[in-house]
Amino acid sequence: RLPKLVADGALIATPAGSTSYARAMGGPPLPLNTPSLLLLGSNVLSPAFFKPAILPMDARVELRTLDSSKRPLRGYIDGRFQGEVTRMTARASSVAAVELVFSPDHDPAEKLALIQFPLGGVCESNGHAERHETARL
């Protein structure tokens, strides 16, 4: 449990959203079949040293503002503005489901591996940039 998060923003992402929204906030991408949610904070003041948290898929996350006149809470769902709110609750649906379909030449696991371990990346050490090939795991 996290009783209080003081931040400019918070994001709850599914594995499908973790490769874009969450990654943009510094979170790790999750494999598509991971039964987890990812909780991230943006510019977190408290708790100190907050890191993205992986939560069970049945977790229920409530975000609320302590004082909406001083710190308004703006709600977004899948990038769509929902207006100013005083409280938002997020959870995975036990009823709705989505089946993702990929073309035979698109391997989502391979894409995730390339995101995490890019080939031909640039590594900086001691102020010098060096090209390197990343080992395939």
Image (spheres, rainbow, N blue to C red):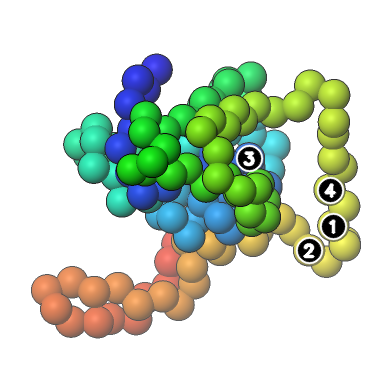
Secondary structure category for the residue under label 2: loop
| Residue highlighted by disc 4 | 100
Q: Percent from the top left, x then y, of residue 66?
A: 37, 29
Residue tagged 1: 102
- Circle 4/circle 3 CB separation < 8 Å: no
Which numbered disc, 4 or 3, marks the residue closer to the eye?
3
- Is tag 1's residue or tag 3's residue first in the polypeptide sequence? 3
- Secondary structure beneath dot 3 equals loop
User: Which one is closest to the eye, mark 1 or mark 3?
Assistant: 3
Looking at the rendered structure, which numbered label has been put on residue 14?
A: 3
Residue denoted by label 2: 106
For disc 1, the neighbor class at 10 Å (few under 14, some 14 to 19, many from 20) is few
Can residue 77 be seen here? The reply is: yes
Q: In this view, does 129 lie to the left or right of 126?
A: right
Asked whether 89 or 39 is in front, the reply is 89
- Distance between the alpha carbons at the discs numbered 4 and 3: 13 Å
Residue type at mark 3: give it.
Thr
- Whether pointer 1 and pointer 2 mark residues with C-beta atoms closer than 8 Å, the reply is yes
Whether pointer 4 and pointer 1 mark residues with C-beta atoms closer than 8 Å, the reply is yes
Crowding at label 3, few (<14), some or many (≥20) Cα neighbours within 10 Å? Answer: many
Q: How far apart are marks 2 and 3 (CA)?
A: 20 Å
Residue that appears at 65% across and 48% down: 82
